[in-house]
Image (cartoon, rainbow, N blue to C red):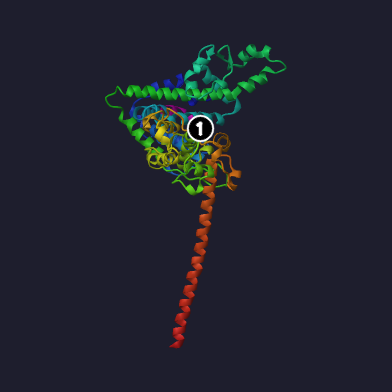
Amino acid sequence: MVGVSFINPLSMEGRERVRQLGSLDSLIQDNPELIELVTRSKSQDISEDQDIPRNYLEMALKRLEWYVKKRNDRDFNYRKFAFLFQEDIEKYDIISFYLLSQAIGVRFGPNSRESRLMVESQGSLIQNRLEELNSRERTEIVLKALQELLSQETVKWTFFENLLSSRRIQLSDLVLDQGEVIMDREDFRNRFGSRLQHRDPDKMYQLLIGQELQELILIRMVMQQTENYMAEVHEKARLMVEPNPLLLELADKVTEILIQPTTSYGGSGGGGGYSYTGPLNREAFPPCVKNALEGIKSGGRNDAIVLFITPFVSYARLCPDIFKQNVTVQVSDKDPELQVVHNEVLPLIYEAAERCVPPLFEDQPQEKININAKLGFGMHSNLKLENEGETKWYTPMSCEKIKLHLPHLCRPDEDCKKIGNPLSYYNRKNWILSKERTESEDNVGKEGYNEEKEKEDQANGWIEVKKDDA
């Protein structure tokens, strides 16, 4: 039976494991048992020594590396990380979780992108581990973990206040009766059985609650606990004279993982190609974007610049494949120092605002703050990393919304028929233009070869003529 701590390392069982840990020196020493477990894990693909975590610190980094590569690398090899889903690794995984959480809490704090990636990776890891279990084990471990998390006999919806405020779950996800959250099958029957006319209570329970909702709540609660734990560590670290050097070393390694170059999938608009992050290609912009960049000469300046151009330009430059990713993304994930935002993204947005009639910021300077907010940096006049996460990084409007709210921008061309979002248009057009350039270069190469061959033949003929003349 899988232990609860394998799903929730912050459980009582997991905390007890940490208390039993001996000397910290053992954390950086090669551990033969860990190496043996990794190399003998089912489906494990060990091709290089660097694929094998040899101690607790390396195990901690593999947890985060798995998530970062899974999310970003199109050549991601699941089998290199198969050991993370084997229950035999549990005791090493628990200690590694605490090490990673403490290192991130001490060095980066609770509002950092490192903290957010840690929280997201833990949620993704739980989901993947549950999927590796058979149906019976999965049901049992979810119920057992939830019983500990929801320790009260009855749980009011206010119990989920943090989850609701962080938007990890929606109130509409929960089944409520007189303010109490209903999770148990028997409880559901007792409360709603007599109210359901011509409906099977068991089927309705499965439809409204069932395994899916239970797993959602479990995962979201562990993610919230992880975030809270790192915040606690951060507060304690502020009172320390000097943090443990081991944690600082681990934090440096975390930074190295996050800045490793990866190639992302993209092209959400079809066309079968990839979308690569790079300098903006204005030639690939859809008509609506080109129209907006020329400046709005009538009404709708605010929406066109703040709600439309800002999300489009920022995602097209930093994360063109956002609609293919099933994760939350922040600007700093793609631009850690905000250099691209300051040097490329904002200037283009401000340029479009200046071309408006009248120029947008002349009579509405507050819209610069709104632009920062739409990029995810809160309602501040200056765009700073410390404010990231106070608001959401807005994704680009769909074509339907543009037609509804900004109809004067919508002047579709032939390619618009194939897509439903301007960003999809950009990805597809980029792919088409790239393909055309490649084919053109190939043709030039072939023509160049023929021309050179002809010159070579002529040269040889001239030499022969000279010989004959001689």
Q: Main secondary structure of the magenta part?
A: helix
Q: Position of residue 420 (x, y in %)?
A: 58, 39
State the residue position of label 1: 85
Q: 369 or 141: nearer the eye?
A: 369
In-image side of 186 versus 228 (left or right): right
Q: Amino acid at mark 1?
A: Phe
Q: Is 128 covered by the magenta stretch?
A: no
Residue drawn 46% across and 82% down? 464
Number of callouts in the render? Answer: 1
Asked if residue 89 is among those painted magenta in the image, a careful observer would answer yes
Residue nearest the viewer, comparing 125 with 388: 388
User: Split into 4 quadrants, where in the image is the C terminus?
Assistant: bottom left
Q: Point out residue 105 in the picture as x, y percentages from the top left corner.
A: 37, 27
Which residue is more in the foreground, 153 or 131? 153
The residue drawn where x is 53% and y is 13% is 155
Q: Specify the quadrant that holds the N terminus.
A: top right
Considering the numbered disc 1 on the image, is that residue within a helix, a strand or a loop? Answer: helix
Q: Which residues are magenta?
A: 86-95
| 320 sits to left or right of 175 | left
Up the image or down, 457 lies above or below 354; here it is below
Q: Is residue 287 visible?
A: yes
Furthest residue to the left? 241
Q: Residue 341 appears in which quarter of the rendering?
A: top left
Question: In the image, is 169 to the left or to the right of 362?
Answer: right
